[in-house]
Amino acid sequence: MSNVIPTLSLRDVESAGFVRELGAAYANHGFVIITDHGIAQSLIDRFLGMYKIFFAWPDAEKRRYHIAGSGGARGYTPFGIETAKGSRHSDLKEFWHVGRELSQRHPYRHYMADNVWIDGIEGFKSTCTEMFETFDRSGRRLLTAIARVLDLPADFFEDKVQLGNSVLRVIHYPPMPPNPTESIRAGAHEDINVITLLLGAEEPGLQVLSRQGQWLSVNPAPGSMVVNVGDMLQRLTNGMLRSTSHRVINPIRDRAQNARFSMPFFLHFNPDFPIAALPSCVGPGKPEPLPPILAEEYLQERLREIKLK
């Protein structure tokens, strides 16, 4: 088994070869690098440019957009709060969350808080909404191939994620302090959701834990997307597709003064979807499946574990 994370083009998503290679990548690594993902570089640059402005603001100004008691569901989460499950040290990052926009009378409205918008940055709401919707489309397109990996109809996931409690996160890892720290930019963790689509992994630091217990560096080409399996998909497939531990390590000395920005999109099931092992993933020689749990209940349980609740 290769220790190189495979690279695939989303242009080939309907081909049998893409499905075969994607299935192998997710079974072996839980990660794949995707090119031709459909998110224009001009949109990425415009979107990230807004957040470079925001994260450069004074701390007191940024904290005006932090909603106490919200678990970081929307708006700003200050530096040093999120902590990897089981870790004694908080991550060296701050971030912003954008979620799905729903009408006031929508039945899922009570699951999803209002987004927080910054009037002082031109085009903030429209650009964030455009980026969220574009990520969502790319993720649902990739799910058609994941369905085929599992010998399911290509549209199997569509009515299970089209109104999911998905979150677009923009992360700022500030330049490192001059003195050594026990914390790292993001401690080893697995993602909660179905799949995570990540832009901005070109700056070195992202590592994936191999089956052999080695940390593998993930260094995609500029503009490429890293897409990994989350715990919800692992649970649905009874471990057939792997949710793999990953981390963001601190930079080497000559890059310590470089800030790092990344944009993960955490694609979720609809809140009332019961996550239960697929029948095809249960049987002799396979682990005993975990009991069914609603997607929203699972999300809240895991948020408490990482100290966002």
Image: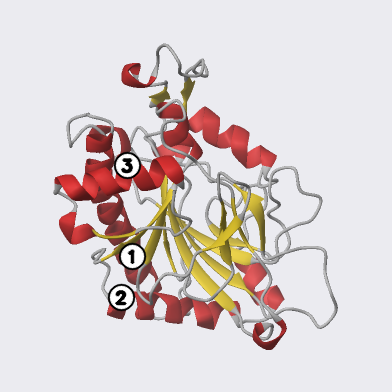
Sort mark 3 into few (<14), some (14-19) or many (20+) by Cα contacts within 10 Å: many
In the rendered image, which quarter contains the C terminus?
Answer: top right
Residue closer to the observer: 274 or 230: 230
The percent coordinates of residue 272 (x first, y second) are 40, 27
- Judge left or right: residue 33 versus residue 142: right
- Judge left or right: residue 169 versus residue 67: left
Residues under labels 1 and 3: Cα distance?
Answer: 27 Å
The answer to which of marks 2 and 3 sits earlier in the sequence is 3
The answer to whether residue 165 is seen in the rendering is no
> Looking at the image, do the residues carrying marks 2 and 1 touch, with CB atoms under 8 Å apart?
yes
The percent coordinates of residue 219 (x first, y second) are 47, 70
Residue of label 2 = 43
The three-letter amino acid code for the residue at tag 2 is Leu
Which quarter of the picture shows residue 280?
Answer: top left
Where 167 falls versus 57 (above or below)?
A: above
Any mark on residue 131, and which?
Answer: 1
